[in-house]
Image (spheres, helix red, strand yellow):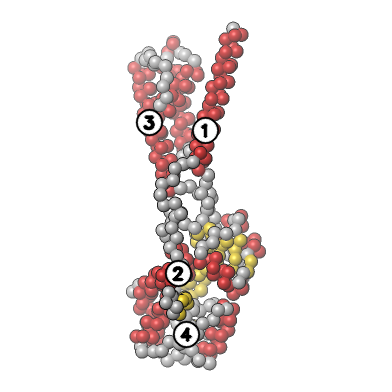
Amino acid sequence: MLYYTNRKGQHMHAGYMHAVMLEFIKRYNGTLNILRFKDHLSIGHIAEEMLATKRIDFVCHPKEPKWNISGTVPLYILKDYILVPHAQPIASYWYFAQPFTRETWLALIAIVAYGIIMFYVSSGSERSEFGVHLLSSWCHLLFLPQPRVSFINWQQSVIHFILILGGFVLTNMYISVLKSMLTSGLFEPQANTLEDLIHAPYRLITDKYYAVYFKNATSVPDEVIDNAFVVPTDELDFNRANLNTSFMYIVYEDRMDGLLYQQHLLKAPRFKRMPESIMDGLMSIPVASSLPYLNMLNIYLSRIFEYGIFHKMKNDAYMSAIDSGLYKLMRNEDDGLIPYDLNFYFFPIVLWGIGLTCAGLSFLLELLRWRMA
């Protein structure tokens, strides 16, 4: 449940649990009395005590596994996930090399080898040097000018046509893949399993309440547990609400959906949810024992869940959190078109320099050979 002060200075309550129970109370002409506790460590003890003495009827908080109190019929399995910062984008100068996959290199080698062999075989008695066929094949692939080509027979005309067609296909495929990568962006390897978090450069922060659960999680590697540290609840809420990418976080999936809703307008998200849950619980609301209207409450919760009203209330709660200023819709810092800087052309410049160096060395070797002859 959310608690905030609006622009008029009024204290407001929000959140989907508050909306669900408030609607139930209004429907049956009840009265809502809200008791707020800042310290999560005391919630379970106080709630258990007050429910046992029937000072309150229910708690607007999912029932924790270790709470020895009654609850409503579970609606679904409530999972606890780890939020990990999204992988960082790769350096811009690597984009030129990324379309060259293994299949692309095999296609290039196959076409060049085809051109060399077929030119050599079709030359007959007028077979020229191997280097001439190699350069001719590369020129066709890269659409580079070459000396005037004389066709000895019709077979060579077909070979030239096949090489030009292969070069056209590969060149356009490279350009289209490169354009797609520039549009979507490329990123460093992303952590996809809990074992990958061992090598993650981030530390996991949590509060004292969830630290007890996290240390007993059997699916989390020991290295990740040892690397976690406990911070005050206010500091955790501040960093987690602002999606601070310096840390990893533990969060229930209902709150996680609200946190990640802030980044749905971003081109590249800030955080990613790990696919494996570290703890599982039941979405059940703690209630006092022998609650006279428990059956009515169970029917009400089941119906709003089955008809999608429960999900609608969750989405409305996320928008209320944004309207209240607790969360914010994040946008890309650079919405306009950004020209490429010199780092983007670093890779082509290096290749150009290597090509000039090789050409210069070849010229010097040819000149040295001519003088020696």
Identify the mark at residue 34; answer none if there is no mark: 4
Residue type, numbered disc 2:
Gly
- Compute the Cα span from label 2 to label 1: 48 Å
Determine the residue positioned at 52% across, 46% down. 90
Determine the residue positioned at 37% across, 82% down. 23
Q: How crowded is mark 4: few (under 14 residues within 10 Å), some or many (20 or more)?
A: few
- Counting from the top left corner in percent of width and height, residue 160 is at 38, 22
Q: Which of marks 4 and 1 is nearer the N terminus?
A: 4
Check disc 3 and report its element: helix, strand or loop. helix
- Compute the Cα span from label 4 to label 1: 67 Å
Identify the mark at residue 51; answer none if there is no mark: none
Identify the mark at residue 325; answer none if there is no mark: 2
Identify the mark at residue 349; answer none if there is no mark: 1
Residue toward you, 35 or 186: 35
Q: How crowded is mark 3: few (under 14 residues within 10 Å), some or many (20 or more)?
A: some
The residue at which mark 3 appears reads as 168
Q: Which of marks 2 and 3 is nearer the N terminus?
A: 3
